[in-house]
């Protein structure tokens, strides 16, 4: 029998491979890599003298097509499941509070970020200094919550979540993406 090879990390250059949904915490980890790559794209956009259209399209697609689904995975499933499974010594409530605060701060900037990028794409303009500041703040909030999620939340999730929790998480994540669940149920059924 051939030993299975360790899973390789993605590049973060494209949406996370749906094949990873069988391992939902690995999928979320890959989504975090994707978010970090988008933050790096935002940094490059902010620092550039002229607007980079392909980068703008990539960022806007991520914000419009990927980010909301990922946040729902966490807020609707991962966070509540962790809150139920964790012990007092995990101090998960304070960690979740910090993560939610940074997510809310980033989300409050999201309409301005989308608007600035869309305006540059539509008008062929460059980012204003105000736009650059908003994009930089957005990326900073995203990075802050990613640090807490990767360093604290995911390791605790790997220790505390049961196989049943992970199966439910994976199924809900599949349904959000219009994919069949492990029981063959789709969102249309």
Image (cartoon, helix red, strand yellow):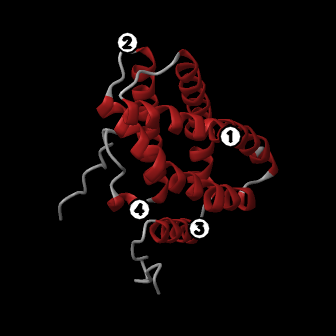
Disc 2: CA contacts within 10 A as few (<14), some (14-19) or many (>=20): few
Q: Is residue 98 left or right of residue 70?
A: right
Q: Which residue is mark 1?
A: 99
Q: Is residue 42 left or right of residue 134?
A: left
Using the numbered discs, state the Cα–Cα distance from disc 2 to disc 1 in whole angstroms.
Answer: 33 Å
Name the image quarter holding the N terminus: bottom left
Q: Is residue 188 above or below residue 90?
A: below
Q: Earlier in the sequence, mark 3 or mark 2?
A: 2
Disc 4: CA contacts within 10 A as few (<14), some (14-19) or many (>=20): many
Label 1: which secondary element: helix
Q: Which residue is mark 2?
A: 49
Q: Is residue 100 above or below residue 74?
A: above
Q: Position of residue 15 (x, y in %)?
A: 35, 49
Q: Position of residue 163 (x, y in %)?
A: 54, 68
Front disc: 4 or 3: 4
Q: In the displayed orientation, state which residue is furthest to the left.
A: 2
Q: Which residue is mark 4?
A: 21
Front disc: 2 or 1: 2
Using the numbered discs, state the Cα–Cα distance from disc 4 to disc 1 in whole angstroms.
Answer: 23 Å
Using the numbered discs, state the Cα–Cα distance from disc 4 to disc 3 in whole angstroms.
Answer: 13 Å
């Amino acid at each position: 029998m051939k030993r299975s090879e360790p899973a390789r990390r993605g590049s973060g250059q494209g949406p996370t491979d749906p094949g990873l949904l069988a391992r939902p915490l690995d999928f979320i980890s890959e989504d975090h890599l994707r978010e970090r790559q988008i933050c790096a794209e935002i940094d490059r956009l902010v620092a550039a003298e002229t607007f980079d259209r392909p980068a703008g399209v990539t960022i806007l697609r991520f914000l419009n097509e990927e980010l909301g689904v990922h946040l729902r995975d966490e807020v609707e499933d991962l966070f509540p499941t962790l809150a139920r499974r964790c012990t007092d010594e995990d101090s998960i409530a304070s960690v979740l509070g910090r993560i939610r605060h940074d997510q809310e701060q980033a989300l409050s900037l999201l309409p301005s970020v989308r608007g600035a990028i869309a305006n540059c794409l539509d008008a062929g303009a460059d980012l204003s200094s105000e736009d650059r500041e908003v994009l930089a703040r957005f990326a900073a909030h995203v990075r802050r919550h990613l640090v807490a999620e990767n360093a604290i939340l995911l390791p605790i999730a790997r220790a505390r979540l049961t196989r049943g929790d992970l199966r439910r998480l994976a199924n809900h994540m599949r349904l959000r993406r219009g994919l069949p669940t492990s029981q063959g149920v789709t969102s249309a059924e």
